[in-house]
Image: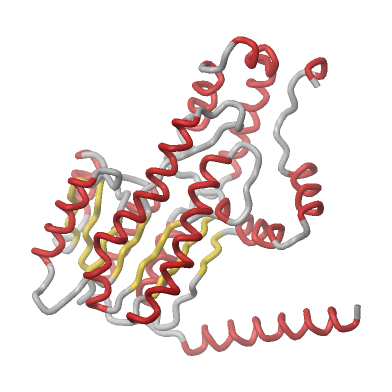
Amino acid sequence: MTFILYTFIALLTAIIAYKIFRYSTNGKIQATDKFVLVTGCDSGFGRLTALKLDQLGCYVFAGCLTQRGIDGLRKIATKRLHPFMLDITNAEDIARAVQIVTQTLPDDQGLWGIVNNAGVSGSGLIEWVPIERYKKVTEVNLFGSVAITTAFLPLVKKSRGRIVNIGSILGRISTAGCSAYSISKYGLMAFSDALRREMKYFGVTVHTVEPGYFRTNMICGGALERETLQLYNNLDDQTKKFYSEEYVNKLLEDIRIYVQQASSDLNLVAETVADALLSTRPDYHYLIGFESKLMALIALLPTSWSDYLFSQFFTIPLPAENNL
């Protein structure tokens, strides 16, 4: 026990010393000659990140899924920001994006950064979520990011630049009701680890940003409630009867509370992405928000401990007693 305690203290001291050293020696690289691609810029983290990088002086290629997203950025951004249509699951869109970026870059310059932000929600109980939904969430959140990265990797290698993947704390620990989303984010974390180790030999660094609970369009405006109701309404009669409308109403109430408690300061994520791209000593992993750091600690606990904590503090409603 004494050895374990001393080892823990030594590790904690080393971590604190490293953090002090990093922040005392950290600086910023010049942003005004850097070209960065950001996906999912219609709203939320992607939009704010694109605008933040534009504000800092970067040239930004902002991939949007809708014309409305493009028009919104054009109204408030400088000429350094170039919004264009990009569906990261569409091979033709990706090829066109590579052409746009290649033609815009100076002949002697590569792409400094990729920010893989585009993603979709994937909530719902495992018994409720059809396999097609699992495939769709993974296609966007994981394979879309893989496709973007591999397509633009030669340009990033040319500049010995950086890749920033927007993950989630749910890519470290999976909670009830989020299996599809967690699967996609676990996969993105695994991809990031492998990519980081492969790209080290080319001078390219890979960083993950792992937000906790933030009030993005994926969960706001009744989005989560609508998604939950749609899943329930598509169930067969027997499964509906097992859970009951009373159960669904309680679940919707819990979702509303969760959304209200989520942070509205999305700029924290944009600022973190900027640090990952422009810091002289960027971290490999960024945990954003108290709940993100807390969940990361819970993920390190023995399974029986973490399961107990989830059963006490991260609960979901139970079906009617007569069905248990």
53 displayed left or right of 100: right
Residue 170 placed where, x, y %? Answer: 57, 51
Q: Quadrant of residue 79?
A: bottom left
Residue 322 placed where, x, y %? Answer: 82, 15
- State whether residue 244 is above or below residue 132: above
Res. 57 visible in picture = no
- State whether residue 197 is above or below residue 243: below
Residue 232 placed where, x, y %? Answer: 56, 20
99 displayed left or right of 267: left
260 displayed left or right of 69: right
Res. 239 visible in picture = yes
The number of numbered discs placed on residues in the rendered structure image is 0
Image quarter (top left, top right, bottom left or bottom right) of the N terminus: bottom right
Q: How is the image coloured?
A: secondary structure
User: Which residue is at a point 61% across and 39% down the rendered structure image?
Assistant: 258
Image quarter (top left, top right, bottom left or bottom right) of the C terminus: top right
User: Which residue is at a point 19% across and 44% down the rendered structure image?
Assistant: 71
Q: Nearer the viewer, residue 25 or 111?
A: 111
- State whether residue 11 is above or below residue 123: below
User: Which residue is at a point 32% across and 52% down the rendered structure image?
Assistant: 47
- State whether residue 10 is above or below residue 198: below
Residue furthest out toward the right: 1
Residue 186 placed where, x, y %? Answer: 53, 53
Q: Nearer the viewer, residue 164 or 28?
A: 164
318 displayed left or right of 67: right
User: Which residue is at a point 63% across and 14% down the rendered structure image?
Assistant: 240
Q: Nearer the viewer, residue 7 or 290?
A: 7
